[in-house]
Amino acid sequence: MRAIISGGGTGGHIFPALAIAEALVKEDKDIEILFVGAKGKMEMERVPAAGYPIEGLWISGFQRKSSLKNWLFPLKLLVSMGQAVRIILRFRPDVIIGVGGFASGPIMEAGYRMGKPIVIQEQNSWPGVTNRLLAKKAKRICVAFDGMERFFPKERIILTGNPVRASIVNSGIKREEALSHFGLSTDKKTIVVIGGSLGARTINRALAAGSALIAEHAREVQILWQTGKLYVDEFHHSETALLDNVRATAFIDRMDMAYKMADLVISRAGALSISEIALTGKPSILVPSPNVAEDHQFKNAMNLVQREAASIVKDSEAVQHLIPKALEAVYDDGLLSKWATNVRQLGKPDAAKRIAQTIKSLVP
């Protein structure tokens, strides 16, 4: 079996793609997998680091605001379609899987026109433009939320949940080992702050604003702070980042260790983050991004809050209230235990396997 997996741009697309690849290899150890991404985007680094080959297309997203970059979009799309056709002719895939992001558009469209079965994996409750455009051409659409027939043909939808990397779910790492990896103490409460692979400005600003309060709790609490690569220069030399009980990093390369040692997670409410939090059973405070279609991160977060499986801080209130709320919560063992117990019930640990089996079912 030969499969192309395409998409990327952010960790929210890349890591589910890698989880699907892992599951496909478990189903068929002789499978050949090729990733296709966008040149210059983070998948061109993350995918090879995970051990898979990748080819890049000269493609970028269409800017919703007026931009000179949009003048190049038709040319980039045309060139990328040609590149996609050549990749398909050379690799001869049995199936093509798209995980969202503009990089998946040309290869999925070219594959459909060349008679290849295509599968969509949609992580969010509000699909991206690429997946909505390709939905009628897909043989199967694997989704993580109910009610997706609003966007996709009902007869092609399979509710699988979001795939999460096996290394995160099945980590054999011990808490002490994880703390040692990040240079943190074994006798303090640990808060892990995740702003997404590219970072979250509001969460970073909240950490920077909370410097004095974080310092007051230095004996009892420590923080691993992922700023995101977009905000390294802005926040890595802040007063908070220089505190002894704070470790600031652009990117957390061992999320299995980060989750293992976390007493509390602060995160955006993207679909991938919520899936990881549920499967690792971690109590969390969610700060939904306001810059997403149909405010779907707020809906994601409220789904947990209504089940007493997490807490929420609005983006507009985070700078003032996030750190005080987190420091109050991390000492409340009963509250943390309740959130952890309830969020575990929302996890779908077999999502990647179900998606892999769906993909295999389309290949003779």
Image (spheres, grey):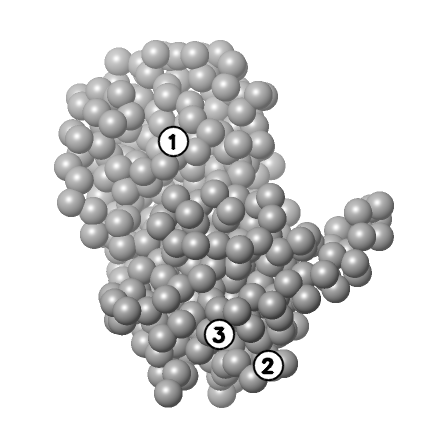
Disc 3, SS: loop
Q: Secondary structure at mark 1?
A: helix
Residue 311 in view of the camera: no
Q: From what the image shows, is residue 346 above or below residue 173?
A: below
The crowd level at tag 3 (other Cα within 10 Å; few <14, some 14-19, many 20+) is some
Q: Amino acid at mark 2?
A: Met
**Residue under numbered circle 2:** 114
Q: Nearer the viewer, residue 29 or 240?
A: 29
Q: Which residue is mark 1?
A: 326
Residue 26 visible in this rendered orientation of the protein: yes
The percent coordinates of residue 321 (x first, y second) are 49, 29
- Amino acid carrying label 1: it is Ala
Mark 2 or mark 3, earlier in chain: 3
- Residue 324 position by quadrant: top left
Locate residue 159 relative to residue 73 in the image: left or right: left
- Tell me which residue sits at (79%, 47%) in the image: 69
Observer-side mark, 2 or 3, equals: 3
Mark closer to the chain start, 1 or 3: 3
> Tag 3: residue type?
Arg
